[in-house]
Every structure is written in structure tokens, then in C-alpha cells.
Image (cartoon, rainbow, N blue to C red):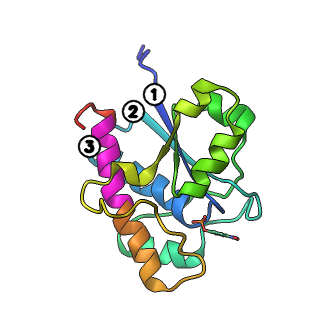
Amino acid sequence: MDTKKTKNLLFVCLGNICRSPSAEAVMNAVIKKADQTSEFVCDSAGIIGHHEGDRADSRMRSHAARRSYDLTSISRQFRYKTDFDKFDMIIGMDDQNIKDLQSQARNQEDLKKIVKMTDYCTKFTHYKTVPDPYYGGEAGFELVLDLLEDACDGLLNHLNGKL
Ligand code: 4NP
């Protein structure tokens, strides 16, 4: 029997319809490419629950599809009572996400799990957040994917002890 525990990763943005479902899909692709699918579980959630039950934004899905990412996750709100226990890392997309997550942390152990996606970038190091593309144009969705591809590579290297 394989008793190795998986590392559980939760990606969080505001609405869980653009950035965090993309992060989940990009990270799953990076993990698959590294042949490490048995070692990780990825999920995503939103600070707000306005889009609960919705698929990812159609603009985000079409930009992601052009890079062969299939955004299948369904939006849900972050649940502090269960998510802090279930996940080993909780990865926010911008500073407000981080503040909102920190304000829901119950203790020091919860706080230690909260990190920011762009902290794992190795190419786009001048970006300190993954900017919200919801009210912007096409370029914003491409930038989200560029940043996530860089950050997810860096995150897996970090988890593998290489960074
Ligand atoms: P996300 O983008 O946080 O990347 O999913 C947003 C989606 C919806 C809203 C805001 C941001 N909204 O206010 O409805």
C-alpha cells in the first residue's frame, strides 16, 4: 500500500472564475509533466461566493484553451473551517487575497500556510501580484497565464526542494 501523503494545494483569488481556476489547471499540467500526479492534489476557491457553482469565465477559458489548458473547476467560496485543515499551502493571487485569508486564519499554523503566487516567479520577478483580469482586456488574460506558468514551475521546484 502506498502510504505517502499527498501535498494539498489550494489556489485562491477573489471570484474563483479567472485567476485561481487557471492556477489550478496550470499547476496540474506542470505536475503531470513532471510525472508527479500521485504526490499532489490541487483545488481552487474564491474569497467571495458570488460565482459559486459557475464555470470559469468564458474569456479566461478560451485564452487558457489556446495554451491547451482545460478549465474544468466550478467556483466555490473559501471555507476557513475546513480549508485550513485540508490544505498544506494556500496560495493567494494578490495582496488583498493574502490579507483576506490572513484575517480568516484561526491560529499561527493557518497563517504559515498562506503564501503569494508571484513569490515563486523566477522570470516575471517584477510582478508582485497576479493582476485581476476581470474588468480589463485580452492582454490581462494572457498576462495571468504568463505569470501562472512561471510561478507554477517555481512552486513545483520549491516543493521538490530545488528552490
Ligand atoms: P478572479 O476575477 O478573482 O480572478 O476570479 C474576478 C472575478 C469576478 C469578480 C472579481 C474578480 N467579481 O467581482 O465578480
**Image-based side of 80 in relation to 73, left or right:** right
* Image quarter where ligand 1 lies: bottom right
**Residue, disc 3:** 34
The residue sitting at 26% across, 31% down in the picture is: 161
The residue sitting at 30% across, 47% down in the picture is: 154
Q: Secondary structure at mark 1?
A: loop
Question: Distance of mark 1 from mark 3, alpha carbons?
Answer: 15 Å
Amino acid type, residue under disc 3 in the picture = Ala
| Dot 3 crowding, Cα within 10 Å, few <14, some 14–19, many 20+ | few
Badge 1 residue CB within 8 Å of ligand 1: no
Q: Quadrant of the N terminus?
A: top left
Residue 63: x %, y % from top left: 44, 76
**Residue, disc 1:** 6
Residue 128: x %, y % from top left: 41, 59
The residue sitting at 63% across, 33% down in the picture is: 84
How many numbered markers are drawn? 3
